[in-house]
Amino acid sequence: MKNILITGVAGFIGSKVAECLIHQGFSITGIDNLKTGRIENVPEGVNFINGDCANSEIFQKKSFQGINFHTIIHFAGQSSGEISFDDPIQDLSDNCVSTLNLLQLARKISCTRFIYASSMSVYGEAQVESVDENHATKPLSMYAVGKLASENYLKIYKQYGISSVSLRLFNTYGPGQNMSNLRQGMVSIYVAQALEKKSIVIKGSADRFRDFIYIDDVIQIVNYFVKNDFVGSEIYNVCTGIKTKVSTLIDVIKSEFVKDTIHVDFKDSTPGDQFGIVGNNNKLIEKLGDIDFTDIKDGIQKFIKSIKT
């Protein structure tokens, strides 16, 4: 039975990854400081450790002694560009110090496989509508700077025999997303507002656009990299390659509330927000083969149904 370490195991994506791998027979140790994650999200069977990856002392606990991890999957961290402006030092700790601590752990225990949750935000304001992994990176937020820095740390740690995959996640949404955090996750913010207030506040233009990817598709991709070899320090866009305007997203959400009138209000955009970005996923498809991505209408329908039931 292979041992996997997952950080952010009580969070949206980390908990889903853990659940998927447990069902396949992997032994999972999970870390989460429960700042935004919820203990009830942690799947049964996880060796759970309540702690902060930015604190190196956590790795001295008995829970880590004698375990040879096959792979480290790093999903923990502060995940909002807007929030990163509130406390840049804390964002640095959450998103960079944590990565370095885990890389040091990997080096110490001779774990040679590291999967990192990066972000499409590293591209900043893209110069083309469809960005591939070779596009220039010009972060617009402290959060994005930290994600890009961690990618570069991973490249440096190649010299210690640690192979890594940085997954530049585009806008991920779906069941299990944090519905109480109204400053992170465009889809979850709009859905939460529609459910609770029958009103949606859009910060910025309705002509902005994104590449939205459903949680199950992300888990499928992460699962592939857990089960297959990778060498060096690789970077992949995790996206559908489909452009969706904010106005279209709002229409899709409103279509799920046929008995209610959903009001839409506009406010100024938030600091560091990208106007529009769509990912080029050719490299990912070449690696994994064809992926049957979930259509935005089907994904939103499943998401809202999961909340209502």
Image (tube, helix red, strand yellow):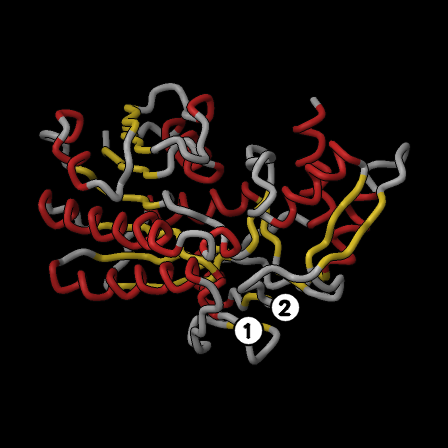
Q: Residue at x 59, y 34 (%)?
A: 180
Q: In the picture shown, does residue 257 fall above or below 161?
A: above
**Residues under labels 2 and 1: Cα distance?**
7 Å
Q: Residues within 10 Å of mark 1 (few under 14, many from 20)?
A: some
Q: In the picture shown, does residue 81 fall above or below 195?
A: below
SS for dot 2: loop
Q: In the picture shown, does residue 244 fall above or below 215?
A: below
Q: Amino acid at mark 2?
A: Phe
Query: Foreground: 1 or 31?
Result: 31
Give the image location of residue 120, x and y in percent: 49, 62
Q: Amino acid at mark 1?
A: Glu
Disc 2, disc 1: CB below 8 Å? yes
Q: Which residue is mark 2?
A: 275
Quadrant location of the C terminus in the rendered image: top right
How many labels, in total?
2
Q: Residues within 10 Å of mark 2 (few under 14, many from 20)?
A: some
Residue 100 as seen in the image, left or right of residue 194: left
Q: Residue at x 47, y 42 (%)?
A: 219
Query: Foreground: 154 or 70?
Result: 154
Query: Foreground: 214 or 261?
Result: 261
Q: Residue at x 42, y 29 (%)?
A: 19
Q: Which residue is mark 1?
A: 125
